[in-house]
Amino acid sequence: MRKSKQRSRFIALCIAPSLILFSTFMLLPTLNIFWMSLLKWGGLSANKKFVGLNNFKILLQDMKFIRALQNTLFLIVIVTIVTLALAILFAAILVREKIKGQNLFRVIFYIPNILSVVVISAIFSAVYDPDGGLINSILSLFQPATWKTIKFLGDQSIVVYSIAGAMIWQAIGYYMVMYMASMSSISIHLYEAADLEGASKIKQFFSITLPLIWTNIRTTLTFFIISTINLSFLFVKVMTSGGPDGASETVLSYLYKQAYDNASYGYGMAIGATIFIISFFLSAVVNKVTHRDVIEY
Amino acid sequence: MSNLKKTSNLKKAFHNNIFKIFIYVALCALAISIIIPVAWVFMASIKQNSEFYANPWNLPAGFYIQNFINAFQKAKMGQYFLNSVFVTGLALLILLVVALPASYVLARYEFRFKKFINILYMGGLFINVNYIVVPIFLMLSGWDDKLDSIFGITLFLDNIFVLAIIYAATALPFTIYLLQGYFKTLPRAYEEASYIDGCSYFQTMTKIMVPLAKPSIITVILFNFLAFWNEYIISLTMMPGKNKTLPVGVVNLYQASRGKAEYGILYAGLVIVMLPTLILYILVQRKLTEGMTLGGIKD
């Protein structure tokens, strides 16, 4: 009897701290997003008024939000497609081919993933700089006389692509290492058999490698959606703060602006709740669309 | 006949070579695109300011260490560096002290609400910091207001200890998920032997089980070191005062030095932020890229 009392006390003591921290700083704030999205709450005054779904009604007509949403969705699509293709390609090369310095390449490709988004943003600001930037100074070598510098971060029609460039640079190594792990678990015999049958490397890639890492790819698609929403916010916050003229605004950077610069917390949280639902919905759709029967061997 | 076979073999070898060349070109292109910008920052950090008006591809004329001295003293990067070291260390400590017992108990014991707690933490994997940073800020500032009206002090915002606690809390779900998975793989014989020797539950956990979980603890430390050291948005929001962490300090420096066209000090600041992570990475890169698949995705 005494033993069992001791046991429950031990369990309670072990669990309680984690539960308290988690509830206070993760669970409660998350629930608060949804609760606060129903309030009209402006400024630091304690003036809160329940307005139901009114914030969401305003949101649907807010052209700035729509634009931010478009930018975010565009980034999700372009970053996912390019990163996925490159990461799978390089993973397949490093796993399947005999490459000199294979380990060195893997080590180098993973470097961007250990750098702070702040550092990457600053690096890319230097790379994109219109006057002394790395890209512009190379490009100007080709046409020294007539060259007009590209304003990567200052041109409304280019800025989203520039952000996407930094995000892809950052993400390739991470996903590559992930795909490498699942590719190296594919049995070598499958490839040997395919070689004997005379299947080309490209054919092998599409009929062996791709189907067998499909589950892994599907999981990473959810990662792509969530992390693009988050990272695009951080990159935009440091590199352009949404400019020029809202051309690179993303949903979360717009949320942050509404909450801090405008101090309209209720409205900001309505944006948060909306993004939360959209990202959930998007992940579910992607998951459904990419569903295939799992191939075992 | 044999001639024909020979030419076909030659042709195949030729194709293979083209393929190989293509592969190496692709690999080198990506490697260069990653190394050059990073290396360029290191070079720019020792350039004098006048050199920034010349071609950016020029090598530095000399080793202008003054950039680093300025960054440490004028831009207070030294103080921010210490803040970051402190916050990262404390957050890691809190995280381990809180997460290890919870993971162990969840992995090994049966009790009421266990399933519920597990679901809670699994759900926590999907909660993202960037969404909840505003509600956390409002919660803390609300607490501060109450304290202020009663005792005349504020405690929660601008407090580096609170920042460390928040870091630890946000890392809990993934850490518990990872450690719990590892504890489950350890054989029960160790604990049974320890109980027979008369160890209490607590002693068994701290003396026997936690040391056994060392490999997964190292993975947890590595990943969260990078996450905490590089963290920007929570720190920016929860520390609105003069006391800052390194990433926030660097962004401030970035904005200030662009305005004043002092570039050298900016790149010195960037080097100060990324050098510790790069050194750590070079030391443990294998552990890091292997650990990633340990708890994350397995198919």
Image (cartoon, helix red, strand yellow):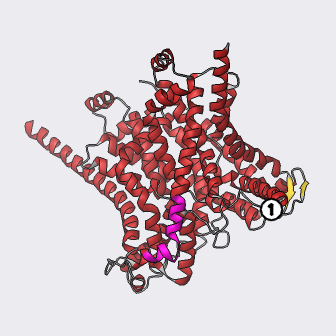
Q: Which residue is the site of mark 1? A: B152
Using the image as rendered, state which of residue A178 and residue B46 is in the foreground: B46
Residue B274 drawn at (x, y percent): 44, 61
Residue A37 x %, y %: 81, 52
Of the pair B262 and A178, the residue shown nearer to us: B262
Q: Which residue range is magenta in the image?
A: B69-84
On whether residue A100 falls in the magenta region, the answer is: no
* In the rendered image, the vertical position of residue A191 relative to residue A157, given as above or below: above
Q: Image point 67% across, 57% down: which residue?
A: A252
Q: Is residue A217 left or right of residue B65?
A: right
Q: For the residue carrying disc 1, how many other residues have a C-alpha within 10 Å: few (<14), some (14-19), or many (20+)?
A: few
Locate residue B290, reporting x and y percent.
Answer: 40, 40
Looking at the image, which is closer to me, B232 or A224? B232
| Identity, as a three-letter code, of the amino acid under mark 1 | Gly
Horizontally, is B118 left or right of A42 in the view? Answer: left
What predominant SS class does the magenta segment belong to? helix
Question: Residue B82 lies in magenta, yes or no?
Answer: yes
